[in-house]
Amino acid sequence: MKFSEISGRRAAAGLTGPAAADIMNAHNGTREERTLMNMTIRFKKLRPQAQAPDYGSAGAAGADLRACLDAPVTIQPGETKLLPLGLAVEIPEGYVGLVYARSGLAAKRGIAPANKVGVIDSDFRGELTAALHNHGREPQVIEPGDRVLQMVITPCVQAAFEEADELPDTQRGAGGWGSTGR
């Protein structure tokens, strides 16, 4: 059963908070119960062909986001294109949507977010877009409805920044790139 189905059933029953899910353990074939965090993220379709974010498996951390295109788009090697996703989302205050590459798309086809990690702030209500870059040597075609990104919802801390004349020493100190070894 997909995580989205579990969440949907719990929501229909009016349940909130952590949920227990019966999940198949891929390593040894046994079934186990895990606690899942539940929250509702409201979204609005801004284009008729837009598709809801969904989880590819019960244990997936990222919800897949799909290209909302009228026709296929080709991304040439070394090129970045902005693709509409057709959705606006309501990230709750105190949380952030972090948008990452889909591992298969990046590893197999060289397509990844141009900014590496996208940030969807809780006060943003505009259309989500995918800035995709082709790191490969071949043109890549993105079809309407292709899963192009994954969004992870996570708590976010807004820090208060305080200027200081001195900072406490640490074992690492000012050691930068490569200072902790390979």
Image: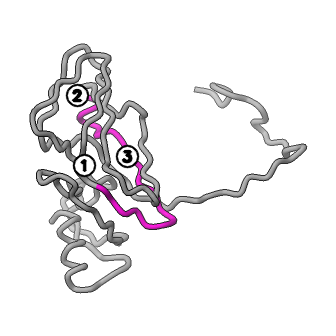
Q: Which region is colored magenta?
A: 88-107
Q: Type of residue at label 1?
A: Leu
Q: In the drawing, does residue 101 fall left or right of residue 11?
A: right
In this view, 130 is above or below 81: below
Disc 1 + disc 3, Cβ < 8 Å: yes
Residue at position x 21%, y 65% from top?
A: 4
17 falls in the magenta region: no
Q: What is the secondary structure assignment of the residue under circle 3? A: strand
- Residue bearing mark 3: 99
Dot 3, how many residues are within 10 Å of its Cα: few (below 14), some (14-19), or many (20+)? Answer: many
- Residue bearing mark 1: 65
Judged from this view, the residue extending furthest toward the right is 165
Disc 2 + disc 1, Cβ < 8 Å: no
- Residue bearing mark 2: 108
Q: For this rendering, which residue is in front, 50 or 65? A: 50
**Residue 115 in which image quadrant:** top left
Give whichever of discs 1 and 3 has the lower sequence position: 1
Residue 73 appears at what percent x and percent y? 16, 29
Picture quarter with the C terminus:
top right
Q: What is the secondary structure assignment of the residue under circle 2? A: helix
Residue at position x 26%, y 72% from top?
A: 21
- Tell which tag, 2 or 3, sits nearer the viewer: 3
Count the numbered circles shown: 3
Q: What is the secondary structure assignment of the residue under circle 1? A: strand
Residue at position x 75%, y 36% from top?
A: 172
How far apart are the two marked residues, 2 and 1, measured between alpha carbons? Answer: 18 Å
